[in-house]
Image (cartoon, rainbow, N blue to C red):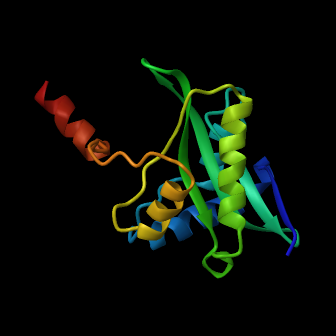
Amino acid sequence: MEINIRKATRTDMPDVLELIKELAAFENEPDAVETTVETLEKEGFGENPLFTCFVAEVDGKIEGMALVYYRFSTWKGRTLHLEDLIVREEKRGTGLGNALYKKVITFAEEQGLKRVEWVVLEWNQHAIDFYARSGANILKDWYTVQMDTEGIKKFIEKI
């Protein structure tokens, strides 16, 4: 199996969205994806792209992807956030995920970044073990905090 990891193009976004939806289903949130191909094209390939996406191809077919974007840490400076890394279910265990992961970490090093960060669900032990084996620090004393559209609206109504 020949794996090709490359930067995604605008025309790859339908496949990327498919993979995002597959990840949402894997994470038991199949109806949570609101992003569209048009949004991915606009935000990733416009004048000021908000993200970089890498795809993993096998025999010319996109079978995995990793989407990253820059963040700024007041302690470290510019860092990289790995939003999603997904490999199609039938291709898991073939080395595609590891190849994408290596690409993300190499990209961060090439950019001179101080840190790469991401979140992993507490029940995804396979991923946790993989990240720990790679040398990543699993921070168990931090909570991920989010406010969705409804929460934003309710907050604004109170102020």
Does 59 sit left or right of 9 as displayed?
Answer: right
Does 19 sit left or right of 4 as displayed?
Answer: left
**In this view, 6 is above or below 72:** below
Q: Nearer the viewer, residue 102 or 4?
A: 102
Which residue is located at x 56 percent, y 61 percent?
20
Which residue is located at x 69 percent, y 33 percent?
109
On-image quarter of the C terminus: top left
Q: Nearer the viewer, residue 65 or 127?
A: 127
Which residue is located at x 55 percent, y 45 percent?
82
Q: Where does the image place residue 132, in percent across and percent down from the top left?
A: 48, 55
**In this view, 67 is above or below 92:** above
Which residue is located at x 60 percent, y 63 percent?
86
Q: How many marks?
A: 0
Which residue is situated farthest in the bottom direction here? Answer: 90
Q: Where does the image place residue 69, in percent across and percent down from the top left?
A: 59, 37
Q: Nearer the viewer, residue 155 or 80?
A: 80
Does 44 sit left or right of 1 as displayed?
Answer: left
On-image quarter of the N terminus: bottom right
**Does the image show residue 30?**
no
Which residue is situated farthest in the left direction here? Answer: 158
Q: Nearer the viewer, residue 105 or 16?
A: 105
Q: Where does the image place residue 134, in percent across and percent down from the top left?
A: 57, 54
Q: Where does the image place residue 38, in percent across and percent down from the top left?
A: 64, 49
Quadrant of residue 2 in the image? bottom right
**Does the image show residue 109?**
yes
